Image (cartoon, rainbow, N blue to C red):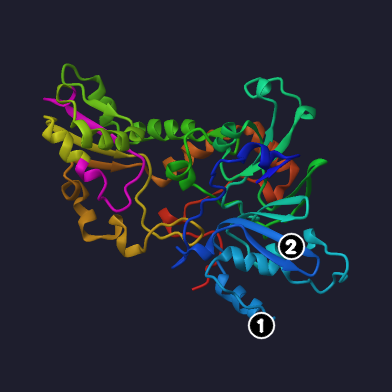
């Protein structure tokens, strides 16, 4: 969402621009599930857009229906909108307290959601107490200051909120900061203001999705003060430590292997469809292909076949993340447990199954080290001093370990 005088009209006039992308929930690939959801309330219209998936959605749907409210879609976003529209018990009828309503929502459902709610000319940016899904704020600045390190806050022309900071530059905005776990931020013509931070249960760590770093986020996005691309590089270095034969191979000559970074494999496959592999690059060589993840195993097999057809004597796969063994119930469209290659009998010989000479994964401990190692200690100290309950460092590894940050509704 954009906030500023005439920004939507000025920037999007006569242009078709997508404003929100969201993984489908259940059978939710329907036009009626498109966001934002807009409803009339006693006090006027509210609009809600959200990313994530509520872990207790079924119980909340029943609660809303017991209040006589019908739901017309399968979307959690509609459910959130209706929950916000309900008047809390202590609120005066003629004076809506939207912050209290948002807090009430956050006590009703612990995760997973980052959301925007708009009422009249005010936007509320909200992130669940576990910070499972990303959310950040950007400033729209004059074009002359877009790449300047000296842009002043008083030159701000508007505010934008997005799941990923990579989207800001294309609309003339600069990254400002993240919305903290549990934080409610108000955005209006007067600027931005942090209104409240709703804490997690004592002892619970944040649970930012670690797979955002591994796969989902664009490399130039910023999470927790670090660029995703830099984290992926650290994953590669950690993988080299855990797979020492990679270093041995690199030292050999003239049989030095050809190393392919994992962010190249999709491009390689696309090029191969048009031109085939460049055989001189691979003929008679041992190739190490570094992939970010293997979910089902049906994408990497054609690439291995292509490389061997191009003359590679060996193709070794190194995966810069652990095996994915569990579905995600918090907003990421990871398939059922049975569909995941790590849970199939073929995984016992995964190399043979995909046609590689060997396969080795990064460990869970190695991934956590690569991700958390880049969060500077001074940033950790600052976050902890601001709000011990809200901002300690922690990540959700449920798809890798089966350890979900909260109890799930089954």
Circle on res. 66: 1
Total numbered circles: 2
Q: Is residue 215 above or below residue 105?
A: above
Q: Residue at x 64, y 24 (%)?
A: 146
**Residue 293 part of the magenta-drawn span:** yes
Nearest to the observer: residue 82 or residue 389: 82
**Residue 33 part of the magenta-drawn span:** no
The image position of residue 364, as x and y in percent, is 42, 46
Nearest to the observer: residue 13 or residue 365: 13
Nearest to the observer: residue 249 or residue 12: 12
Q: Residue at x 57, y 73 (%)?
A: 72
Residue bounds of the magenta highlight = 281-302
The image position of residue 201, as x and y in percent, is 67, 60
Circle on res. 299: none
Q: Residue at x 77, y 29 (%)?
A: 153
The image position of residue 176, as x and y in percent, is 68, 34
Disc on the earlier residue, 2 or 1: 2
For marks 2 and 1, give the CA distance: 22 Å
* Labels 2 and 1 touching (C-beta < 8 A): no
Residue at disc 2, secondary structure: strand
Disc 2 target residue: 45
Residue at disc 1, secondary structure: helix
Q: Nearer the viewer, mark 2 or mark 1?
A: 2
The image position of residue 386, as x and y in percent, is 75, 42
Task: Please rate how many residues cluster around mark 1, counting C-alpha atoms within 10 Å: few if below 14, some from 14 to 19, many from 20.
Answer: few
Q: Quadrant of residue 407?
A: bottom right
354 lies left or right of 99: left
Toward the front, the furthest residue is 14
Task: Please rate how many residues cluster around mark 2, counting C-alpha atoms within 10 Å: few if below 14, some from 14 to 19, many from 20.
Answer: few
Q: Quadrant of residue 347?
A: bottom left
Q: Residue at x 19, y 30 (%)?
A: 277
Q: Quadrant of residue 112?
A: bottom right
């Amino acid at each position: 969402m954009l906030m500023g005088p005439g920004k939507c009209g000025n920037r999007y006039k006569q242009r078709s621009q997508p404003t929100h992308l969201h993984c489908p929930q259940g059978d939710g690939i329907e036009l009626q599930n498109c966001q934002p959801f807009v409803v009339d309330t006693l006090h006027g219209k509210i609009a809600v857009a959200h990313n994530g998936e509520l872990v207790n959605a079924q119980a909340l749907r029943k609660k809303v229906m017991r209040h006589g409210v019908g739901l017309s879609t399968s979307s959690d976003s509609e459910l959130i909108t209706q929950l916000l529209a309900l008047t809390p018990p202590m609120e005066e009828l003629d004076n809506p307290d939207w912050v209290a309503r948002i807090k009430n929502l956050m006590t009703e459902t612990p995760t997973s959601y980052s959301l925007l709610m708009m009422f009249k000319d005010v936007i509320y940016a909200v992130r669940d107490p576990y910070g499972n899904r990303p959310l950040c704020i950007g400033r729209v600045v004059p074009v002359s200051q877009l790449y300047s390190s000296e842009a002043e806050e008083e030159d701000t022309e508007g505010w934008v909120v997005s799941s990923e900071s990579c989207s800001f530059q294309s609309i003339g905005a600069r990254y400002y900061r993240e919305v903290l776990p549990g934080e409610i931020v108000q955005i209006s013509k007067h600027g931005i203001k942090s209104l409240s931070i709703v804490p997690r249960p004592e002892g619970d760590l944040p649970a930012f999705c670690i797979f955002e770093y591994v796969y989902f986020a664009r490399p130039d996005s910023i999470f927790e003060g670090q660029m995703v691309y830099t984290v992926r590089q650290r994953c590669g270095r950690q993988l080299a430590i855990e797979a020492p034969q990679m270093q041995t191979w690199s030292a050999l000559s003239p049989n030095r292997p050809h190393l392919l970074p994992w962010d190249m494999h999709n491009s390689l496959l696309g090029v191969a469809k048009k031109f085939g592999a460049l055989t001189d690059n691979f003929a008679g060589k041992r190739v190490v292909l570094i992939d970010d993840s293997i979910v089902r195993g049906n994408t990497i097999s054609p690439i291995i076949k292509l490389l061997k057809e191009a003359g590679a004597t060996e193709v070794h796969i190194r995966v810069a993340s652990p095996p994915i063994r569990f579905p995600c119930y918090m907003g990421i469209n990871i398939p059922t447990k049975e569909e995941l290659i790590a849970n199939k009998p073929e995984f016992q010989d995964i190399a043979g199954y995909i046609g590689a000479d060997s396969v080795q994964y990064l460990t869970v401990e190695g991934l956590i080290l690569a991700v958390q190692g880049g969060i500077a200690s001074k940033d950790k100290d600052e976050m902890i001093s601001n709000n011990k309950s809200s901002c300690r460092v922690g990540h959700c590894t449920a798809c890798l370990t089966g350890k979900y940050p909260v109890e799930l509704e089954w």
